[in-house]
Image: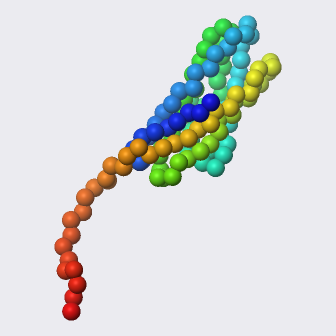
Amino acid sequence: NTIEFTGALHATVIKQVRLKNPSTKALIYNAILIGRDAGDFSLPKGNTVTIAPKKQASMNVEFTIRFLRPAEAVLLLTSSGIDAATLTFSLKSEVKHIEPAGTLKCRSPCYEL
């Protein structure tokens, strides 16, 4: 699964990963961000999520677009305790537009003799 973070340059984008627990026991997942640009992504609510039996929970992933090139990382969710599937999500960014931070006017001659 791929989660895409799109927006303006320097914008902060938050995406929510919804996790379901079909079992009759609580699941605890530990999240790790790995990859080339993992440091640019963050988990503002912490890197652990607990999902009650037969319920669902969500985990927020935050990204601030700092560069024009696409950023890439992987969100890896591993279970602690009972045997549960390890989940992986590909995180990718795309700059949709650039808004100027300001405008500067200047005058100068085109050339001097």
Residue 27 in which image quadrant: top right
Residue 104 in which image quadrant: bottom left
Answer above or below: position of 34 versus 55: below
Residue sitting nearer the eye, 89 or 39: 89
Question: Which residue is located at x 28 percent, y 55 percent?
Answer: 102
Residue sitting nearer the eye, 50 or 22: 22
Residue 3 location (% of width, % of height): 56, 33
Question: Which residue is located at x 20 percent, y 77 percent?
Answer: 108
Residue sitting nearer the eye, 17 or 81: 17
Question: Which residue is located at x 33 percent, y 49 percent?
Answer: 99
Residue 30 location (% of width, % of height): 70, 29
State the residue lying farthest toward the bottom.
Answer: 113
Answer above or below: position of 90 versus 57: below
- 63 left or right, relative to 74: left
Q: How is the image coloured?
A: rainbow
Regarding residue 39, the answer to whether it shows in the image is: no
Residue 41 location (% of width, % of height): 56, 41
Image quadrant occupied by the N terminus: top right
Image quadrant occupied by the C terminus: bottom left
- 85 left or right, relative to 66: right
- 44 left or right, relative to 26: left
Regarding residue 50, the answer to whether it shows in the image is: yes
